[in-house]
Image: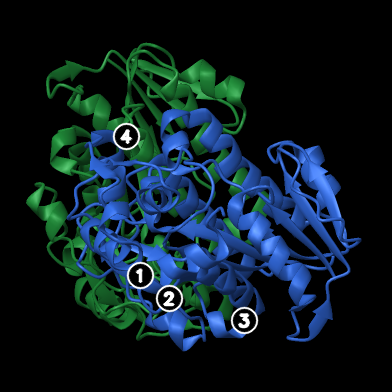
Chain colours: A blue, B green
Amino acid sequence: MKVVITGAAGFLGQRLAQRLLALGHLSDNNGQDQKIDQLVLADVVPAPHSGDPRVRIATGDLSDVAFLRSIIDAETQSIFHLAAIVSGQAEAEFELGMRVNLDASLALLEICRQLEQKPKVVFTSSVAVYGGNLPQTVLDTTAVNPQSSYGTQKAICELLLNDYSRRGFVDGRTLRLPTISIRPGKPNKAASSFASGILREPLNGETAICPVSPQLRLWLSSPRQAIASLIAGHNLPAAALGNNRSINLPGLSVTVQEMLAALERQAGREVAERVQFSPDPAIERIVASWPGAWDDSRAKALGLTGDADFDAVIQAYIQDDRPT
Amino acid sequence: MKVVITGAAGFLGQRLAQRLLALGHLSDNNGQDQKIDQLVLADVVPAPHSGDPRVRIATGDLSDVAFLRSIIDAETQSIFHLAAIVSGQAEAEFELGMRVNLDASLALLEICRQLEQKPKVVFTSSVAVYGGNLPQTVLDTTAVNPQSSYGTQKAICELLLNDYSRRGFVDGRTLRLPTISIRPGKPNKAASSFASGILREPLNGETAICPVSPQLRLWLSSPRQAIASLIAGHNLPAAALGNNRSINLPGLSVTVQEMLAALERQAGREVAERVQFSPDPAIERIVASWPGAWDDSRAKALGLTGDADFDAVIQAYIQDDRPT
């Protein structure tokens, strides 16, 4: 089978590509395991190439329909659509966010609609679709009410994916990811960038600035679990999803303070003290609008799993990702 | 002030135009009453012209951006965006529905975003944004889950209007209308067309076919109340709307059987017996996915009003609309 990843040069995209190549197969529309013959890694910058002969690197702008057509064709059985302008940037650059997060997603779905064989489309959404006056624990039946342009664009694509799936144009599934922590590498323009930075930088021997209150509660997932959920979500049979293709993935409900306490337990006081608090109202406004917890029982009933606790998340970063 | 109505040749558009011309004024962004100097009646077919010197008829395709630019300009203070491909037709003609219900609405908002003075935009949405496994009474906090392309397109535009309003690009308000009954005139391609036809045709001396079960519960509003809500919703101060611009308008929760019982009370058994039942699964599937009732306490707290009972709705049709 031919599989496409958009946003393949991003952190999750790279991890997903590695994992798919190691696995070597995925379930198709009929629940049959299929060998991955070709993996197209599409992004606006070239995705890293391991030299695996199954990989094709495709570099271009997803909002360019000709580029989209060059990566999705009649042989494409599965698309992991991860490409996005992140929350902070989509808020700062409205037109760019609309073009990539909305227009390109719509164009991708339209290309799929015109194919004979309808691909599976795995779309990553976010805590950012929720906002406003939220219950302490968000339920599957809680109305979305995004308080950022990024969250709005994600919520719109969820609706499109549902309708395109209902009509049989694609076999879509939206996986709503918790905030990912701990991302390796550099800070990015996501409003939630600090949720990795306040752990990663101290563990790497650097100081970090926390722009939000220690009491802020976040809904988190490790990269490892997020990747596992993307693959498990892909492999779910369509019939298991009923009339709503959006799944709130398992996560951990943890305050910033609790994150730093776990850091101290795992790496010592000296490391945890490398975090300084310096409030940034623009970031706090966006991140505080997101839920600190949601009910993940539907995801768990579908067989998707979460992290054990935040200490385990820190241990996983130290094992998998900390630069040596 | 200059006011634009899209879909002005439609039934609600015509009523709204008449009512605005009779009223002669609306509240502006600052809550000040402003005289309506110009009323642009835009539609793909010419809206009826009473000869009122304030009226300008604009005929064109709303999905043509040049046409949109010709009707919305720096002087436009208020837009009632009613134009839509109705539910049954948007289900049958997917591309047409997407073009008018989504693309044109997005283009309209984009034109507004580029204006110096941000217009008020009143957008009409629908019971069709809800669907799936609904509680008996839908709440403001209930997740939308449209089971039709029309409902999907309406739900997407609601999200856009919220984000464009949050960012100050427009001052938007979405009014979610109940199914309108009794519409005068001819049947249309809305899945809910029967909800008027089973009353209107018998009252006009004709037989009518009811394509759904007598037990089906509908959430209804008379045309009179719908028009009153559009104007009252326009005049609400933005501050009253908080972080969610979508309002579930007041309605009546009535089964088909109860509608026909009211018809018999108001017009006699002979009239009520002009309705025959002949199930149409395509219509029943769409209409049965809509809520039979929603909590309208937010709308009522904002001063919006509903019909007294369905007998009064029938009386209003006989007074206002029945051909003589």
Q: Local crowd at mark 3 within 10 Å, few (<14), some, or many (≥20)?
A: some
Task: Name the residue nearer the viewer: B168 or A84.
Answer: A84
Q: Chain of mark 1?
A: A
* Residue lying at 38% horizontally and 77% vertically, measured from the top left: A296
* Residue lying at 19% horizontally and 47% vertically, measured from the top left: A213
Foreground tag (4 vs 1): 1
Foreground tag (2 vs 4): 2
- The label shown at residue A236 is 3
At label 3, the amino acid type is Leu
Q: Are marks 2 and 1 in contact (CB under 8 Å)?
A: yes
Which residue is labeled 1 in the image? A310
Q: Are marks 4 and 3 on the same chain?
A: no
- Gap between marks 3 and 1 measured at Cα: 27 Å
Which residue is labeled 4 in the image? B165
Where's the N terminus of chain B, which quadrant? top left
* Residue lying at 12% horizontally and 24% vertically, measured from the top left: B31
Q: Local crowd at mark 1 within 10 Å, few (<14), some, or many (≥20)?
A: many
Q: Are marks 2 and 1 on the same chain?
A: yes
- Gap between marks 4 and 1 measured at Cα: 38 Å
- Write down the quadrant of residue A321 in the picture: bottom right
Foreground tag (2 vs 3): 2
At label 1, the amino acid type is Phe
Q: Local crowd at mark 2 within 10 Å, few (<14), some, or many (≥20)?
A: some
- Gap between marks 2 and 3 measured at Cα: 20 Å
- The label shown at residue A307 is 2
At label 4, the amino acid type is Ser
| Of pointers 3 and 1, the one earlier in the residue sequence | 3
- Vertical placement of residue A117 versus B231, above or below: below
Q: Local crowd at mark 4 within 10 Å, few (<14), some, or many (≥20)?
A: many
Residue B261 placed where, x, y %? 25, 80
